[in-house]
Image (cartoon, coloured by chain):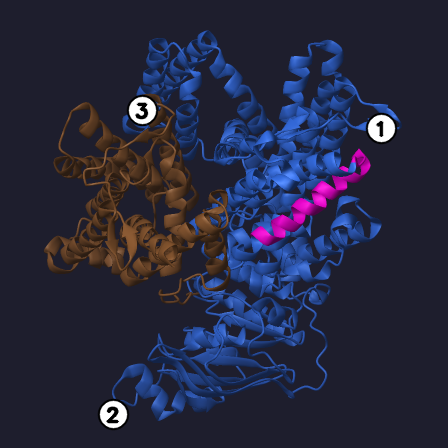
Amino acid sequence: MTMRAHSSSWAAVVWVLAVLIPLAIPNPYYIHLVETIMIYSILLFGLDIVVGYTGQVSLGHAGLFGIGAYTAGVMFMKLSASVWFILPTSIAVTAVFGAILALPALRVSGPYLAMVTLAFGTIIQILINEMTFLTEGPLGIKIAKPVLWGEKLTEREFYWLVCVILGLALIFVHRVLRSHLGRAFEALKGSPIASDCMGVSVYRYKVYAFVVSAGLAGLAGSLYAYSEQYISPNTYNFELTVLFLLATIMGGRKTRSGAIIGATIIVMLPKLLDDIELFRWVASTAAVVIAVGAVIGLQKKFTTPKAVIIPVVGTLALAAFSYQLKNMTDWRLSIFGLMILFVVYYLQDGIVGFISKLGHLGEVESTSLRETDSVQASSDVAHPSTALGQNRNHAVSAVSATVPHSIILSAQSVLMQFGGLKAINDVNLVIKRGEIHGLIGPNGSGKSTMMNVLTGIYIPSAGQIEFNGQSVVGRSSSDIALSGIARTFQNVQLFGDMSVLQNVLVGLHHSFESPLWNVALHAPSYLKEEMQANARAHDLLEFVGLDALSNELAHNLPYGKQRLLEIARALALNPQLLLLDEPAAGLTAPDIKELIAYIRKIRDSGVTIILIEHHMDVVMGICDTVSVLDFGQKIAEGKPAEVQANEKVITAYLGGSSTTEKVQ
Amino acid sequence: MEILLQLIYSGIALGMIYAVIAFGYQLTFATSDTLNFGQGEALMLGALVGLSLVDTFGMNYWLAIPVVGVFGLFQGALVERVGVRPAIKLKSEFGWIMSTIALGIIFKNVAENIWGRDDLRFPSPLDESPIKLFGANVLPMEILVIGGALLMMVLIEFFNRKTIFGKAVVATFNDREAARLMGINTSVVITFSYALSSMTAAFAGILVAPLTLTGATMGSVLGLKAFAVAIIGGLTSGLGIVVGGILLGVAETTTGFYISTGYKDVPGLVLLLLVLAVRPSGLFGKTAIKKV
């Protein structure tokens, strides 16, 4: 909380300074430079949503920027539209193109998506060039500064307009990214499958991210058109798109300050390269700083000679090179390329990330102290509830069971075929409401495949599955999740870069109904939702004993706690049916005891459970019914004791037919 | 009709160039699940180095081809060492995408500074008067491009299937970890696949150069369209890229003639978007099953 207040007061200070610049420095050249930085920052806020939050590479943002600029230019030229009309229209038109760009993105990611966005950007540039009837082609379009309340804005007044819009964009982006929408974006980067199974549709939120991002690019583009007063197709090329990406990763992903630093770098750098003397000076300084840093690093032994040799030699070579050249401008692109390589390998978290890491090194002692304090404090509070307390029972509240022992899920003749392999072969499964239903079998018998079929990750090759009387076959994972089936994963699928609390909040995504504008305006209805979700998330974390760790990043948790967090996250969906895929794997004996207590408690609150587990004592101890799979077929079903005595089951597990040993 | 046939001929020649570059994508994708976003620049460097050999050093075109090939091998290995290997170590997809893009930009910029920003003419090694084939004109150089490209791909396929080193490549493709445990030096295999990939691109560059203009910017869009071909054909299908390449090449020459040369790049790129939106595994590729 203090951290947040801290960063927003910093933002306010920087913003006020930016507003004051034209009064201090009347030179229009510098005013225009800062204006460009601000306009790029708006675009980079948006690019960061796609790159930093959802983790996709977009090489199409120069194209989107161009669409924004040309929407403004064309409307100014053909319709002499006013700025009040042009800015919203540019945002809307570009957002539509963002949605178009996102359509292939639904199916592909990674390098494919990078190529798709690159193709998109190239097409846009070609179209701007060729559609002369609309865009005047290579001739470009001239635009005058906007007219506000009957007066044409001066350079300085327009600068202040950009300041205001930047401030609004900053608040908008910040609020959206801190909301359930931002968490959804981050979740689909962390684990797309887990997002879908938490009811956060990966498809929908990828498109959402692209649309918001494109809208901001459109806004930046239209402001750019007004700022430059002349636009031509060649601005919006591959070079610009790569520059934008460089700015995003160099400044620092997932921060607004990183976007502003990145924008400053890409605007100032070409100016810097124009001045060879200045460049020589900067290159030499960089070489000295890196060399000194390397020597210190080596002395203090937190780096190795091998790790520092390339940056040291590289910067020295660059400094030497700068004295060889008479003209740096021609080598601008190479410098950009080298900077990208440097950032990719040595500055992955960007400048902001690097600085905050340095800051953390100094703070380590104090934070760890604080942490132990809070652990102590909250474990005192949590204690009564871990002893199966009564007041916390509401943490797990299923939509109350209508009729106990009615059928909640029935699967009939389910077949799941991969090529020639029948991973599940003609399996019938009936789960009664309120039961803990065990699903066991040797490795590779099709248990996890069954889970994936039930949650819509696989579509069965044949057979019916009904949940609460409705078929789930062919429905999307997120749809199935929202209808009341939650799950955990055999190989833990947490959103590793998000905090423990945020992980559970993603599970609570379904409880948010606020649309984008309510989030941006911090409407009371949204604030109430956020507050309730937070309270509920804390309850759930307390239920599994993790509340003290709620601000820790999920991937920092020990393995056993990660599994518990997955359960808490699944419970956040308010499921009627909970699928637990090997929850005890990797847990110590006392942890397993605790887990059993949790599972019982969940069941007692009315949630039906399907449990896949290899620990037979767990299965036999708590299951009401057990089904046994072997080679994709159900070979036995019944009460735990019956199953344990079943000849077929013993054979499946132990191989021999003559043996009379019991399973465990 | 004669014009259409002629367009088809040059479309096929162009398409084979795309197929060769796409083949290069397949080679590296097969061994390391990565590809060189600067593949177009590898082609451009091949063409320009070839031009210098022929023009400045007066080397015979046919002798220049193997020299350019060797140059391509080294260039590809460099890309892998600098751009790809560290990123694979970091397990960063974003990393290799950005670093191969960065290397591509650097190569382009270096080429601009060495050979200038203007497009140059590459002297044709063959007779430049067209010959008649089924009633339409075709340039001897176009026939050379088609034959050369096919030969190149067949040779590398042969190498991969019949030699022990090729089997290591195939094994690495099937399961990198298992191949490594079987004693195959997979990182050498990956470097080698990049070297081969850039060699094919450089070879395509010197083949296509006499037909088009040669310059620092010739590579970028070519690389992108070849990716379209790789996607249309599927990243694992050899036949697919030949068919895809021809499809795209013909679409491009006919668009250029009947609509406008300004739009000639559009059909390929739109096709890329459509294929990825509808069938990401390509028209000839197999769909992979995602594992949870």
CA gap, disc 3 to disc 1?
50 Å
Mark 3 touching mark 1, by CB under 8 A?
Answer: no
The quarter in which the C terminus of chain A is drawn is bottom left
**Front-most of residues A417 and A146:** A146
CA gap, disc 3 to disc 2?
82 Å
Label 3 SS: helix
Residue furthest out toward the right: A149
Q: Report the magenta stretch's main SS.
A: helix
Please tell me which residue is depicted at 33% across the width and 49% down the height of the picture.
B14
- Residue type at numbered disc 2: Ser
**Front-most of residues A349 and B220:** B220
User: In this image, B277 relative to B167: left or right?
Assistant: right
Residue B267 in view, yes or no = yes
User: In this image, A349 relative to A26: left or right?
Assistant: left
In the rendered image, which residue does mark 1 sit on? A148
- Whether residue B136 is in magenta: the answer is no
In the rendered image, which residue does mark 3 sit on? B115
User: Which chain does brown denote in the image?
Assistant: B
**Front-most of residues B57 and B291:** B57
| Part of the protein shown in magenta | A80-101
User: Which chain does blue denote in the image?
Assistant: A
Query: Around disc 2, counting alpha carbons within 10 Å, would you say few (fewer than 14), some (14 to 19), or many (20 or more)?
Result: few
Residue A658's label in the rendered image is 2
Residue furthest out toward the top: A277
Label 1 SS: strand
- Residue type at numbered disc 1: Leu
Position of residue A100 measured from the top left corner of the image (x, y, whole percent): 60, 53
Which of labels 3 and 1 is toward the front? 3
Position of residue A471 measured from the top left corner of the image (x, y, whole percent): 60, 82
The quarter in which the N terminus of chain A is drawn is top right
